[in-house]
Amino acid sequence: MEGPFCFIVQKGISCHRNVLNRPLIMEFDLTGEHAKYSYKLLAGLVTPRPIAWITTMNEDGVVNAAPFSFFNVLGTRPPVVAFAPGDKEPGIPKDTARNIRRSGEFVVNLVDEACATAMNETSAEFAFGVSEVEFCGLSTEPGTSVGVPRIAEAPAALECREWSTMEIGRNRIVIGVVQRIHTKEGVLDPDTLLVDSSRFQPIGRMEVPAGYCRTSDHFLMPRPDE
Ligand SMILES: Cc1cc2nc3c(=O)[nH]c(=O)nc-3n(C[C@H](O)[C@H](O)[C@H](O)COP(=O)(O)O)c2cc1C
């Protein structure tokens, strides 16, 4: 960036003010010298993110659980979700991705405040074959459309079959089609099927390294044509 108010600060990041005393704009080149800041910047800025607390099962029937906030629902016909486990090392998948590659099944458990501490504990690196579910004293309920159980403490769970997994560098993007949804009592109004926002309060992932948000402060904004 050239100009009278352009200057370079630390770490080779280009910073500029268009007009004196206007807010400082920072620009990062993620295709080049600033690629190393990608995680810090993107995970910090693209927020809040929902958290998928994914359960999978290995060949010995051991249930694995781990949280992933590079996650969202991407469509409803069919109902599609995706999440992105980064590789442990180039070509070496995390246990979640390894189990899905074998079985093609997983469950997305959603996370509310009551589950937050347990969710965080399951993010620790356990050896393959050690169940985070057992280690953290969580309970499970059997799947009804997949062999993988859901976490009983979670307010809602989506049973999924893998559609495909894309590999982009060290990212795997697991795309799944939702087969069944389970919700705890109170989460949905049984007549309208609308979420009761006083009973379902998922947490969101915020700034790195440890930021989260509550979702207890709602506001309504109907669409212009509604
Ligand atoms: C809130 C939260 C969100 C996370 N999101 C991701 C993510 O999107 N992708 C990822 O690769 N790791 C993510 N992690 C780290 C994984 O949970 C962690 O690497 C875990 O040990 C993976 O477990 P696994 O090897 O059993 O699959 C996240 C951790 C936390 C606490």
Image (cartoon, grey):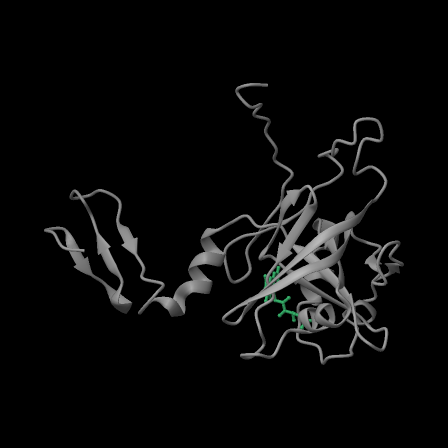
Q: Is residue 135 shown left or right of residue 119?
A: right
176 or 2, which lies in front? 176
224 or 213, which lies in front? 224
Determine whether 27 is above or below 19 in the image: below
Q: Position of residue 174 (x, y in %)?
A: 64, 61
Q: Is residue 12 shown left or right of residue 55?
A: left
Which quadrant of the picture is home to ligand 1?
bottom right
Identity of the residue drawn at 16% across and 54% down: 6
Determine whether 147 is above or below 92 in the image: above
Identity of the residue drawn at 57% across and 69% down: 86
Instruction: Judge whether residue 110 can be spotted in this image.
Output: no
Q: Position of residue 198 (x, y in %)?
A: 73, 34
Identity of the residue drawn at 67% across and 49% down: 80
Q: Quadrant of the C terminus?
A: top right
Determine whether 179 is above or below 216 in the image: below
Query: Which quadrant would residue 131 be assigned to in this image?
Result: bottom right
74 or 217, which lies in front? 74
